[in-house]
Image (cartoon, rainbow, N blue to C red):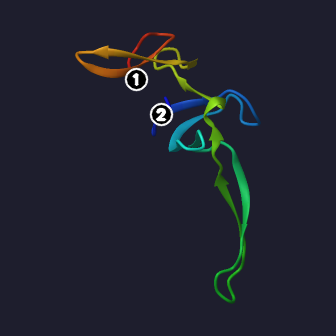
Amino acid sequence: MKIKKDDKVIVLTGKDKGKTGAVVKVFVASNKVLVSGINVSKVHVRARRSGEKGQIVEKNSPIHASNVSLIDPKSGKATRIGTKTIDGKKVRVAKKSNTTL
């Protein structure tokens, strides 16, 4: 998977199209990413102790990796990711501006 933790991404499709956020966690097996502030759903939580009230909590749900794209550091728009070998090290490169990530 080309998207890593702490990458800035933009949502390409779905209810949150156009929103941006940072990747919090990557689920490689299911090809999904957890992005802060994206795909938020409300979850009802039961009271844990007697006398305590139940509550509604907002929770981020994972989104498929194909529905997000990395943000180009120069232009701020969505870009694809390529790789280059520089000084014997493999680095990720933004396809639009050809800058390293």
> Residue extending furthest front?
29
Q: Residue furthest top?
A: 97
Tell me if 51 is positioned left or right of 76 in this view. right
| First reached walking from the N terminus: tag 2 or tag 1 | 2
Given residues 89 and 29, the one toward you in this image is 29
Percent of width and height locating residue 97: 47, 10
Residue positioned most to the left: 87
CA neighbours of label 2 inside 10 A, class few (<14), some (14 to 19), many (20+): some
Q: Quadrant of residue 79?
A: top right
- Name the residue at the bottom extreme: 50
Q: Position of residue 5 (x, y in %)?
A: 46, 40
- Disc 2 and disc 1: Cα gap in Å? 9 Å
Q: Residue at x 64, y 86 (%)?
A: 49
Report the residue marked by disc 1.
Answer: 101
How many discs mark residues in the rendered view?
Answer: 2
* Residue 93: quadrant of the picture: top left
| Above or below: residue 68 compared with residue 57 | above
Q: Residue at x 68, y 28 (%)?
A: 18
Q: Amino acid at mark 1?
A: Leu
Q: Check disc 1: other Cα within 10 Å, few if <14, some if 14-19, many if 20+.
A: some
Q: Amino acid at mark 2?
A: Asp
Q: Secondary structure at mark 2?
A: loop
Point out the image quarter for the C terminus. top left
Image point 54% across, 18% down: which residue?
80
Give percent across and percent down for residue 40: 69, 49
Q: Is residue 72 above or below residue 28?
A: above
- Secondary structure of the residue carrying numbered label 1: loop
Numbered mark located on residue 78 in the image: none
Task: Please name the residue shown 65% across and 32% down the image.
Answer: 19
**Residue pointed to by mark 2:** 7
Circles 2 and 1, Cβ within 8 Å, touching? The answer is: yes
